Image (cartoon, helix red, strand yellow):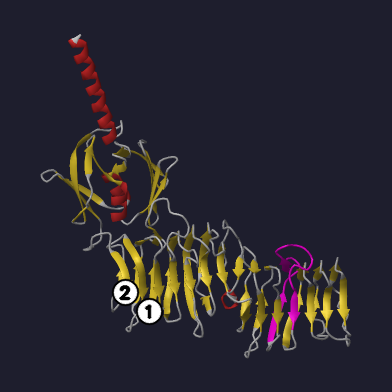
Amino acid sequence: MKLSVIRCMLAVLLIAVCVMRAGVASASGEIQKSVAVKVNGSNLDVEAHLIDGRTMVPLRAIFERLSATLEWEATTRTITATKGSTVVHLQIDHVEARIDDRTSTLDVPPLLVNGSTYVPLRFVSEALGADVDFDSITNTAIVSTDDSCNLPGGQVHSGTIKPGGETWGVCGSPHFVKDDFYVEGNDSPNLVIEAGAVVRFEKGTSIFVGLNAPGGLVVEGTEKDPAILTADTAGAQPGFWKGIHFYEQTVKGRASIEFARIEYAGGENGAVTATAGTSPVELTVSDTQFMHNAYAGIQLTENTRLSSQSKKLTITGTKTSPSGGGAPIITAAYGTNKLPDGNYKGNDLDVILIAASMSSTTINTNTTWNKLSIPYQAKITVYVDGPSSPVLTIVPGTVTIWEKLSGLTVGSYDRGGLIAKGTKDQPIIFTSELERPGSWDGIGAGPYVGKDFRLDFVEIKDALNGITLPEDLGPVLTNSTIENSKEYGIYIKSSNVSTNYLVGNAFRNNAQDIYTL
């Protein structure tokens, strides 16, 4: 009997030991001893282990110290690390790994150790361009990159920029923004974010540029080493951090973002927002990806716009927020000028949303609406007038959508013009969001409309009145179609009309094609 009890106790003890071992490492490997790790001379302040003869380290610690961004896919337990143009793919308990399109076989796969994911130090370090040596006397793995950084990774930023400005680079990366950060000062300081830098933002934090005093922000990524601005959390959602905000005192020529990836920002405003009153602000954004943001990728309010150097934008995964939005770009009238085309698909709203805090917005300088891969959609009425006799030019093939009670009005309060010249193959389209007669106000010419008012090869659909003219303006409409107007295809506020607008144009399903007083 005693022998049976002893055997039973031994069996229970053996099971307990196995369970404890399973909690320390997965069945694929066994911890042999702890190992110290240094990266560029600084200790990696984590617990590393020698497992089956290979040094294994916590994945987040090593990837961030090497300035790589990290993505975790919980369903497949897959790890994706990106540094510049290099992408490394790993999977828990799988020995097969990929560097870009090349497949490698690991001696020890990524493992779960006490609930944390450990990865092979040498493989990931060398994959990301670092060298690895091992000092057997001190039992230390030594990782060296080809830079001469003397700052430890994980630099923390909050409050106001230092006088003279700051540079956030690969050295000191990842950078952590723990509270709102203000780029401003009496000496007009600049914040420069260098190529390859990774900046992680705490929940609800922002960078404010030129809010209370002059300041500038320049993001200088490269195609090989883009700058990464992202959330400091696993499983981030759009709107986790609040984005970058440029204000009226932004230093001219010091508001630019090149070769960057900006993700999980926005909320009440866009991931990148520019706001100005009387002094215009021009922002350059090029070769940049906006992913998984809330409200908008880029928001341009009041007198702000993108510069002519802006190009090659990708804005995708934008979600609506409690403030609305959901479009890649949201802009007032001033910001609609010569917007660059890009990859703007895959958002909640695949449109360029024209909006403002008021019920209307005014184009008061010469403006061109380029043909883009997605339509323009106006939530409010757009006026074209001002002391400088502004003209809105719309490029062939452009599609515009108008929401209820919105419309396009030219020369109503001051001089203004509209040149909308499409082609037979690429007509310019004016239509409604609701796609029913009378669901937008149409195109109106006011008493101050100038000689630059011409519509050729345009299609006007579902308006209250397709076109409203103050008088007979002559053959300003040619080769065009007006259809589904609730009241009139053309409404002319005069009885002295000699131009036959029916000739050379098509009128379909209007309550009345032409009406004159």
Q: Nearer the viewer, residue 160 or 255?
A: 160
- Residue 319 in sight here: yes
Q: Is residue 274 magenta?
A: no
| Image coords of residue 71 (percent x, y) | 40, 50
Q: Look at the numbered discs 2 and 1 and tell me whether their residues touch, using CB distance below 8 Å.
A: yes
The residue that label 2 is drawn on is 161
Q: Read off the magenta span.
A: 416-445
Q: Quadrant of the N terminus?
A: top left
Mark number, residue 215: 1
Q: Earlier in the sequence, mark 2 or mark 1?
A: 2
Q: Residue furthest bottom?
A: 387
Residue 426 visible (yes or no): no
Measured along the vertical axis of the image, is residue 3 above or below residue 284?
A: above
Q: Amino acid at mark 1?
A: Gly
Q: Quadrant of residue 460?
A: bottom right
**Under tag 1, what secondary structure?**
strand
Residue at 61%, 79% in the rendered image: 367
Q: Is residue 47 left or right of residue 499?
A: left
